[in-house]
Amino acid sequence: MALKDAKKLYACPHCLKNHFKKKGYFYRRISKTYIPRYFCFDCRKHFSTRTLSKTYRQKRPDLNRQIYLYLTSGVTLRRTTHNLGCSYKTVYKKYLWLSQLAKNYHSTQEFQIKELQFDEMESIEHTKLKPLTIALAVSDDYKVLGVKVGTIPAKGSLSAISIKKYGPRENQSSFVVTELLKSLRVKPKGLDFIIKSDSKFEYKRIAQQVFPLKKHLIHIARVQKDKKREMKYLKSEKIIFDPIFALNQRMAKFRDHIKRLTRRSWCTTKKRENLENHIYLYMADNNGYQIV
């Protein structure tokens, strides 16, 4: 590119002035190309055509898309490392970078919806003695509107063992649901905007607190299906109407496409914040965000 053409297209990213000159090249090993470098006379700094790129200073930008597809398709971080032939540190850093891109992109979105469905699903933090709750909000057109992760105490026979080993565990269930609904960037489409949830006692109070003038419908969970293997193939089982189907289907897809949420798996979440990061990454894939 000639210098006069570069001045039409670029300004110095540091001072935004157009008073610079070309000063050599640097070789980009991955793309096997020479990238022109420039020098600004005003701020006395160097820059190139890659300075403002999202992948600035990344040594392996060619792996971004592949890592994104693997981690949103039910593959673990370590298996992604094995498949791509790179180090775990590379995959982990790019996973954090991609999830931050997904968070930033999602924070700018506003959704126009007719129906809001919310509920919680459970996971664990390293061990079953430290369970987590995942508050999730979904629209009627299957868009994931938001997510929050919090701690809950162990239940049943594990409760006493958990308290003995890790101490009392805060129940953040109501808190994360409230924070989730408050953080949603939604715009009702029409006058018949409704909110749906299951029959958990706190949900009615939280919905009235955050959306005081909106209609809230409570749906009792469906009767437990027969566990016989042949029953799931019968037509009578497929025609049962689920009023919060969009929410339940997204939760099922979370279990299938996010490996750390798969039931009966040795892949578990070691850090609570990484679980939320991974969900945001899958949210970008589900909602169609073009982050890479």
Image: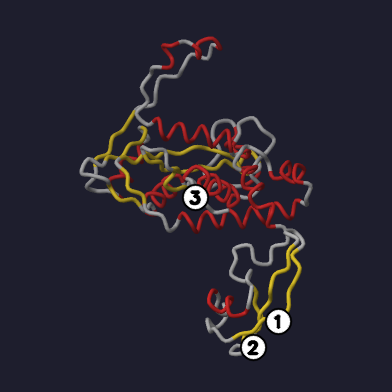
Q: Is residue 48 above or below residue 213?
A: below
Q: CA distance from mark 3 to mark 2?
A: 37 Å
Q: Position of residue 176 (x, y in %)?
A: 44, 49
**Location of residue 3 (image quadrant):** bottom right
> In the rendered structure, are the residues bearing label 3 and label 2 in contact, judged by CB atoms less than 8 Å apart?
no
Give the left or right position of residue 164, taking residue 215 as reference: right
Between 31 and 142, the one lying in front of the other is 31
Q: Residue at x 31, y 40 (%)?
A: 115
Residue matched to label 3:
289
Going by the numbered disc 1, the residue's amino acid type is: Lys
Label at residue 23: 1
Residue at disc 3, secondary structure: loop
Q: Residue placed farthest to the bottom in the image?
A: 42
SS label for mark 2: loop
For image coordinates 54% across by 54% down, the residue present is 291
Around disc 3, counting alpha carbons within 10 Å, would you say few (fewer than 14), some (14 to 19), or many (20 or more)? Answer: some
Chain-order first, disc 3 or disc 1 = 1
Closer mark to the observer between disc 3 and disc 1: 1
Residue of label 2: 44
Residue 252 in picture, x, y percent from top left: 51, 32
